[in-house]
Image (spheres, grey):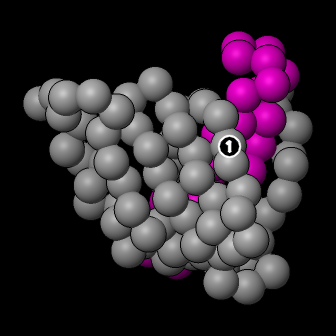
Amino acid sequence: MAKTISEFKSAVVKDVKPIGEEGSDWGWRRDFRGFKGKICFYESEKYEPGMVYVYMQNEISDFETSSGSIKINDKTVTLTTKNTEYVFEILSE
């Protein structure tokens, strides 16, 4: 079970970077740079209590991150998971 922390009508994935060396199974994440859509932030309550993950969707596609730690700086949100750093820009609430 997860607890909804917040959700926004519109956001964009500004950047996606590997943590450490980029493995052969990492590259698919790069395809989400520029992805725009509704964004929801959830707090894991069962598997990794206190950690946050993101679910984004638009009319064409969706994706979900692994859980990690979050930093918020105005309209920019950075989520750092075990393998990836995601940077999101909130466009509208």
- x, y (%) of residue 92? 73, 85
Could you tell me how many numbered marks the image carries?
1
- x, y (%) of residue 14? 44, 69
Whether residue 51 is situated above or below residue 28 in the rendered picture? above
- x, y (%) of residue 20? 27, 28
Whether residue 74 is situated above or below residue 46 in the rendered picture? below
Going 74% across and 51% down the picture, which residue do you hit? Answer: 41
- Residue type at numbered disc 1: Ile
- Horizontal side of 67 relative to 82 (left or right) equals right
Q: Does the magenta stretch include residue 54?
A: yes
Q: What element carries label 1?
A: strand
**Magenta residue span:** 38-62
Residue 61 visible in the shown view: no
Q: Mark 1 points at which residue?
A: 70
Whether residue 30 is situated above or below residue 48 in the rendered picture? below
Going 63% across and 67% down the picture, which residue do you hit? Answer: 76
- Horizontal side of 13 relative to 72 (left or right) equals left
Category of crowding for the residue at label 1, using alpha-carbon neighbours closer than 10 angstroms: few (below 14), some (14–19), many (at least 20): some
- Horizontal side of 73 relative to 63 (left or right) equals right
Based on the displayed image, in which of its 4 quarters is residue 58 positioned?
A: bottom right
The residue most toward the top is 47
Q: 27 or 60, which lies in front?
A: 27
- x, y (%) of residue 37? 57, 75
